[in-house]
Structure formats: C-alpha cells, structure tokens
Image (cartoon, rainbow, N blue to C red):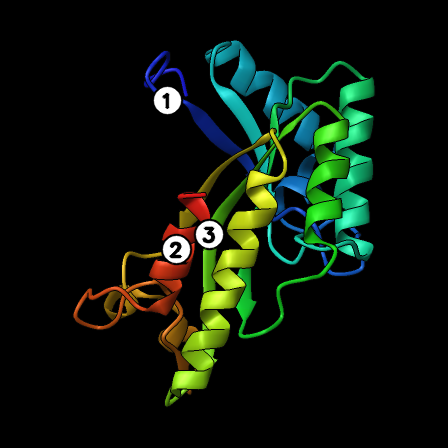
Amino acid sequence: VSHYRGQVYSWDVVNEPLNADGSFVDDVFYQAMGPGYIADALRTAHAADPRARLYLNDYNIEGINAKSDAMYNLVKSLKAQGVPINGVGLESHFILGTVPSTMLANMRRFAALGVDVAVTELDDRIQLPATSADLAQQASDYATVVRDCLAVPRCVSISQWGIGDADSWIPGFFPGYGAATMFDENYQPKPAFYATQQVLSR
C-alpha cells in the first residue's frame, strides 16, 4: 500500500473473511490474531495511504442471508469503533437465474451504514451448452444487477471477472459450466452486453 500511495483508488484489504454461516474463516490471520485482525489491517492500510478507499470483499453476500448479515454486523461494528472502512465488495459470482431478489435491499442497508458498495467480480455461469433461452436469462440477470446498482447512489462500480468467456475462470473450477461473461469465446458481445448497455443508457 505504501509503494502505491496516492496512486490507487481503492484496496480490497481483507478478502473473503467469512464462512457461509457468518463465522470467521479460520485462516492464518484469524489463528494468529483473532477477529481483531480485520480492524488492524484496515487501520494499517489507512496509515499507509490515507486517501485510498478501503474495502472488505466476499462472495455470497449479495442477497440478505446469514453471511451478509454477519458482514453487515461486522461493518457496523467497525464503523462504531472508528475503524477506517469505506466500502463492501459483493463478488457476485452467480449461477444462471439466481440473482437474489434481496440484492437491492442488501445494497441499501450497507449504504445506510455510510459505506460504498461495489460489484467486484460479476459473472453468471451457465450449464453448457448454453441455449438461446439461457443467454436471454443471463441478459436479464446482468440487467438486474446493473439496475440494482444504479438505484443505490453509493453503489460505485461494477467489475466483470474476466473480459470474455475465453478467459473466464469458471470452466476450470466448475466443470460443465461456462459462458459466464458478457462476451463469447471470440470476444463478441452476447445478449447480456446489450441488456447492460440498454440499462445504462436510460
């Protein structure tokens, strides 16, 4: 952080600290320092670059559930302690048709804590081969995410994980699934691209 002081807009200071049930991941940092390591990491990052925006980032916290409740309570506690935290990253690795109906409400409750929200790793995996109906559903999923973000002033960005299907991480981790991005294997726009474009143009 010190090396890039003043040059980086934001840092993912602590990545994926929570389990599905909302407990802390029992990793090397937690084992060495307990749950206080998160506050320590944020304070240390802030001291190294006071102008950078500091985030916590995790997956399966897009909708309201046990894990997002735990993240919400963690952020609320950090804010109450005066810990410098500026945002929460929602990774948003979706399976086709599963964008949570509570995503907008979830974004709004984080924003109400006084932090920004970012969609940080968006993709929407499809069981292959993808049909035209699948691609239409994917377009709807992408549009929903963009629409939800636009409805929350503190939702500051959306990033897709990978540029196109040719370089997506999905097939290597979820055999039989793929076609998760807005661009196909030849980097040509898919229906999801045009749906996203349409939402952004309104």
Q: Residue 45 at what x, y percent from top left? A: 52, 20
Q: What amino acid type is highlighted by mark number 1?
A: Val
User: Is 66 situated above or below 178?
Assistant: above
Q: Nearer the viewer, residue 61 or 98?
A: 98
Q: Is residue 91 visible?
A: no
Any part of residue 40 in sight: yes
Helix, strand or loop under label 1: loop
Q: Amino acid at mark 3?
A: Glu
Label 1 close to label 2 by CB (< 8 Å): no
Q: CA distance from mark 3 to mark 2?
A: 5 Å
Q: State whether residue 126 is above or below residue 111.
A: below
Label 3 sits on residue? 121
Q: Earlier in the sequence, mark 1 or mark 3?
A: 1
Q: Earlier in the sequence, mark 3 or mark 2?
A: 3
Kindly identify which numbered label has been placed on residue 8.
1
Tell me the crowding category of disc 1: few under 14, some 14 to 19, or many 20 or more residues within 10 angstroms, Cα based: few
**Picture layout, residue 170 above or below residue 123:** below
